[in-house]
Image: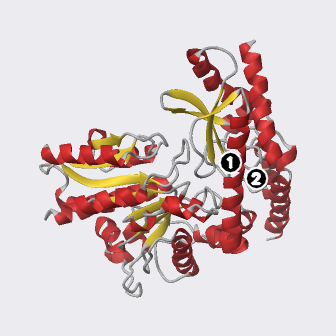
Amino acid sequence: MDELLRAGRAAAELAAGHLAGGRERAVWQPVPEQDRDWLTGQQLPATGRPLDELVDDVRTRVLPYPMGNGHPRFFGWVNSPPSPAGVLVAPLAAAMNPSCAGGEHAGVLLEHAVVRWLAELTGFPHGPGAGLLTSGASMATVISLAAARQHAGRRDGWDVREDGLSGRPPMVMYVSEEGHSCLRKAAELLGLGARRLRTVPVDGRFRMDVGALRAMLARDVEAGLRPFCVAASAGTVSTGAVDPLDEIADVAAEHGLWFHVDGAYGALGILADGAATAYSGMSRADSLALDPHKWLGVPVDCGCVLLRDPATARDAFSLVPAYLRDDSAAGFGWFSEYGPEQTRPFRALRVWATMSHLGRDGIAGLVDHTVRLARTLAEMVEAADDFELLAPVTTSIVAFRCRTGGGESRLDELNRAIPAAVQHRGRAFVTGTRLAGMEVLRACLLNPATTAEDLSVLLDEIRVVAAEMVR
């Protein structure tokens, strides 16, 4: 125990120093060959090593090369800095090391509470047991679509789990062309097939075109197919757009479709000042996926699925062998009955600590701060002759292009190359995507420490690398 205490104190100091020193470091830097060789090529030691040596290796070989998402000028993908409260309690969850599949212990009981908190924050109707924590929104999506598939089969008088999909009218699902790739992955994993995944065009604001959705549905019904689910986005990854959820919910109700909302990144955007109207209809979903490890900053990994009727997911997944029966589980059963994971980590402690530390006002303040910064960045882009804003700012993502030199084809080449060049300079981190057939830059703001000055640094860094490329 003395060794653990000594090494634990050193590790805690390292963690605190890493969190506190983010702004002074490069946002990101390549790993030198010597350290890359050590990280990838080391051999398993024949005899055990002391704990303090392991901590020292982390200090010298691991911590110097972060992804960069802890830095205030990291604007890439949708990766947040870790909540200090979540970091603080992570070792305690590991020390307890429970399986949160079920049973009566703190990990399970706390998960019920934090799932309810997330439902309350997003305005999602939540009954006891109507949700669970997952590894991320990808797994939350698998759970949601499996429940939707089973539900559709039951309505048609058969059991997908027992009978499979063979011999039945092909099930069809509808997603926006701006929908996340996890929707397609889930459809493939569940045997629905990518060819039965309808890609619905978007409108001028990059939201699902409801008229096009209706037309696709009519054609598929006439062709004898079985539409079963429509998946909308509450915050797309390219522009942060929120689909017209109320209108899509109307279509789902008219056609008896499962209505799924992918709010992995953007569901908490409902808390921003004046944003609630854009999210109207989210509460009508049958399932909602969201990621506490995104906007909330809960240390990875932690997603969540919220369900209007938990019985649907239980029908899709419940399998209770005799050795796992728990007669004290009341009517809810075990969490493992609602998804594919059997052994489940104690994710709830990190969520509980993060949300408790911030409080509702702090969470709303974090969301509002980053949304306001995104609008500020959009204004800076629009005011500049060498940048072009490509989409309205709804959440905290800004999609734009650098217009330094050359025709359209040259601009595509330029904007495709800019992110890597900016990243290698180490002063800011931005990523790119394709939007309306164009290569674009996208900045996602999630860090509470980011300032307007950091936005100026980002644009200046883009200008520097763009000028070098044009020369």
Q: How is the image coloured?
A: secondary structure
Can you see residue 302? Answer: no
Residue pictured at 73% horizontal, 22% vertical:
466
* The image quarter in which residue 245 lies: bottom left
Report the disc number at residue 17. none
Q: Nearer the viewer, mark 2 or mark 1?
A: 1
The relative height of residue 167 versus residue 311 in the rendered view (above or below) is above
Q: Quadrant of the N terminus?
A: bottom right
Residue 100 placement (x, y as % from top left): 51, 72
The residue wearing badge 2 is 49
Given the image, on which type of amino acid does mark 2 rest?
Answer: Arg
Can you see residue 220? Answer: yes
Given the image, on which type of amino acid does mark 1 rest?
Answer: Ala
In this view, the residue in front, 234 or 133, is: 234
Q: Determine the secondary structure under disc 2.
A: loop
In this view, the residue in front, 23 or 123, is: 123
Residue 260 placement (x, y as % from top left): 38, 58
Q: Residues within 10 Å of mark 2 (few under 14, many from 20)?
A: few
Residue 49 placement (x, y as % from top left): 76, 52
For marks 2 and 1 on the same chain, the one whose residue lies earlier in the sequence: 2
Residue pictured at 43% horizontal, 41% vertical:
203
Q: Residue furthest top?
A: 471
Q: From the viewer's perspective, tell me whether residue 269 is left or right of residue 332.
A: right
Q: Residues within 10 Å of mark 1 (few under 14, many from 20)?
A: many
Residue pictured at 55% horizontal, 59% vertical:
291
Q: From the viewer's perspective, tell me whether residue 374 is left or right of residue 287.
A: right
Residue pictured at 20% horizontal, 61% vertical:
153
In this view, the residue in front, 278 or 338, is: 278
Residue 272 placement (x, y as % from top left): 63, 62
The relative height of residue 84 versus residue 58 in the rendered view (above or below) is below
The residue wearing badge 1 is 374
